[in-house]
Image (cartoon, rainbow, N blue to C red):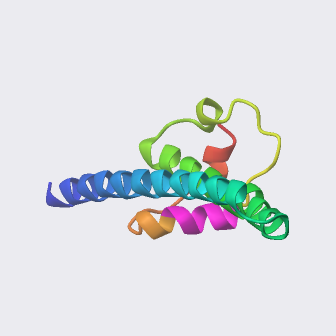
Amino acid sequence: MTTTKNAFEAKVQAIHRLRINVKSLSAEARFIRQEERRCAKCYRDGLSAHRRTTLREESRRANLALAFIRGVPRSTVEPKVLKPVNQTLLKLKINKFLTASEVKIGEWLKT
């Protein structure tokens, strides 16, 4: 009974931590957009590229990890998949927040 309760509590804690991660990534994107409007053109391109590549991919992985831990099918989160996700980085993201699970990410990505 206690291991089930501990697993449940770990999952709930992981969900809360991932929600904070998703919110902080979206806030970072907002801050970068504000700075893009303020700064010179030479700096704007670098900030924009960071926001559109690195930050966007990290935010996608965080949202997918949150859906995985919650048990939501991927087809609900991403109805149309235009770009494949890096499974290794997604698994690392999930393991960062929920270390006690054996992640079967390949099966989930097909759902």
Q: Left or right: 41 with respect to 75?
A: right
Quadrant of the rendering where the C terminus is positioned: top right
How many discs mark residues in the rendered view?
0
Q: Nearer the viewer, residue 91 or 4?
A: 91
x then y, percent, for residue 48: 77, 59
**Image quadrant occupied by the N terminus:** bottom left
Q: Give x and y (percent) for residue 110.
A: 69, 41
Residue 101 position (above or below residue 26): below
Residue 108 image position (x, y, % from top left): 61, 45
Residue found 82% across the figure and 47% down from its top = 83
Magenta-drawn segment: 87-94
Evaluate whether residue 38 shows in this view: yes
The residue located at (19%, 54%) in the rendering is 5
Q: Where 111 falls versus 5 (above or below)? A: above
Residue 90 among magenta residues: yes
Which residue occupies the extreme left position in the image? 2
Residue at x-position 75% and y-position 55%: 52
Q: Position of residue 79 (x, y in %)?
A: 70, 29
Closer to the camera in the image, 45 or 2? 45
Q: Nearer the viewer, residue 18 or 68?
A: 18
Q: Quadrant of residue 38?
A: bottom right
In the displayed structure image, the side of residue 46 where residue 101 appears, left or right:
left
Secondary structure mainly formed by the magenta segment: helix
Kindly tell me whether residue 57 is visible in this rendering: no
Q: Is residue 14 left or right of residue 26?
A: left
Residue 3 shown in magenta = no
